[in-house]
Image (tube, rainbow, N blue to C red):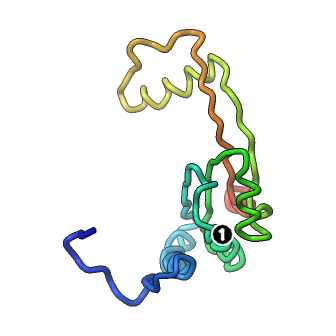
Amino acid sequence: MKFGFEAAQGRADSGSVEIDLEEMLKNLTPAPKEERTAFGLFIDEMQDIFAELPGLQHQAGLREWPFYIIGAGLSNLSAVLSEARSYGQQLFDYRRIGPLDGSSTRQALDVPSVRFGAKFKPQPPENFRWHPVAIPISSKSMGRLIGI
């Protein structure tokens, strides 16, 4: 794939995903730390990701980098993370979610669309239900940042 320019050489270009991501975060995290905010990596279908992410989250926690992985995945996600790293399952806080009731479904659809000046036409039927099958997870250490 060509982008019309050459990649910068010298940092995060070793070819090892784990090393390159760690170098990228080392360069990226000082600014949010100084501003007392954080950098989040949001991942859907997290059970399909590469095994380096639990190690990266672990290193970020040890170094007190303001970096957090927030993801969603199938019910086998905790097992997949444990297979990737023995401590992978303990790095994250798991929350199961299920179907929304009618009122919550309408709110989930209407609030963001109205905020951007849009409206659903026609309105979803009253018996419409949204059935998410994901399990959102977030770094346990994120609670320190947001005061939980």
Asked if residue 30 shows in the view, the reply is no
Splitting the image into 4 quarters, where does residue 102 fall? top right
On the image, the x and y values in percent for residue 74 come to 67, 45
Q: Which residue is mark 1?
A: 57
Above/below status of 72 relative to 35: above
Q: Quadrant of residue 116?
A: top left
Q: Farthest residue in the top direction?
A: 126
Q: Please name whichever residue, 89 or 35, is drawn nearer the observer in this view of the structure.
A: 89
How many neighbours does mark 1 have within 10 angstroms: few (below 14), some (14-19), or many (20 or more)?
many
At a point 62% along the width and 33% down the height, the residue shown is 132
Residue pictured at 40% horizontal, 12% vertical: 122
Comparing 31 with 85, the one in front is 85
- Residue 15 % position (x, y): 46, 82
Looking at the image, residue 13 lies above or below residue 136: below
From the viewer's perspective, is residue 77 above or below residue 102? Answer: below
Residue 6, how many percent across, how many down?
25, 80
Residue 50 image point, x, y percent: 58, 66
Look at the numbered disc 1 and give the secondary structure of its residue.
Answer: helix
- Nearer to me, 133 or 26: 133
Q: Amino acid at mark 1?
A: Gln
Q: Quadrant of the N terminus?
A: bottom left
Which residue is painted at 72% across and 45% down in the image?
75
- Residue 25 seen from this side: yes
Displayed quadrant of residue 104 = top right
Q: Name the side, left or right, on which 43 lies relative to 15.
A: right
The number of numbered badges drawn on the structure is: 1
In the displayed structure image, the side of residue 113 where residue 137 appears, left or right: right
| Residue at the limit of the structure toward the left, as seen here | 4
Which residue is located at x 46 percent, y 86 percent? 14
